[in-house]
Amino acid sequence: MENVKYLEIKKGDMVVVLSGNDKGKKGKVIRTIPSERKVVVEGINMQTHFLKPTKEMPQGKITQREGSIAVNKIMVVCPHCHEATRISHKILENGKSVRVCQNCHEVIDKI
């Protein structure tokens, strides 16, 4: 796979899942993994994690944690119009590049 350094989705973005068992659910991006083109979303793709017994915890433990999800299975939710949207880019007067909602044409990034 190609070496990807940039994703259109950033940590802290609100996203909606487009396909899979969690289709239609919304969540906040916790972490991005650009090299694998994946993100970890809060409360989405929950996986069972088994912890082995230790001296402090002799019985072991079963926990739930978020697994990664492919970037092409999620869409950013615009903070202004509250709809799932594609992202375009715009260069401001000061030369800074920002992400823009294609539905309402408002800036998604905090300036």
Image (spheres, helix red, strand yellow):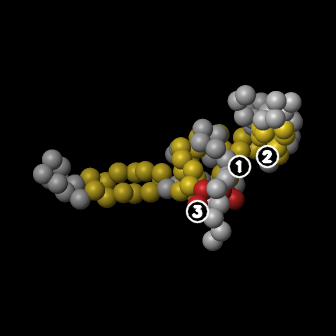
Query: Which of the two labelled residues, at mark 3 and mark 2, occupies the earlier sequence position?
Result: 3
Evaluate if marks 2 and 1 touch, with contact meaning CB atoms under 8 Å apart.
Answer: yes
Q: Position of residue 43 (x, y in %)?
A: 52, 45
Query: Which of the two labelled residues, at mark 2 and mark 1, occupies the earlier sequence position?
Result: 1
Q: Quadrant of the N terminus?
A: bottom right
Please give left or right for residue 60 compared with residue 15 in the image: left
| Above or below, 79 relative to 2 | above
| Above or below, 3 relative to 99 | below
Q: Tell me what residue is drawn at x 84 percent, y 33 percent.
A: 92
Label 3 to label 2: alpha-carbon separation = 20 Å
Query: Which of the two labelled residues, at mark 3 and mark 1, occupies the earlier sequence position?
Result: 1
Q: Which residue is mark 2?
A: 87
| Above or below, 76 relative to 71 | above
Q: Which residue is mark 1?
A: 8
Going by the numbered disc 2, the residue's amino acid type is Ile
Going by the numbered disc 3, the residue's amino acid type is Glu
Label 2 to label 1: alpha-carbon separation = 7 Å
Going by the numbered disc 1, the residue's amino acid type is Glu
Q: Which residue is mark 3?
A: 36
Q: Position of residue 56 (x, y in %)?
A: 15, 47
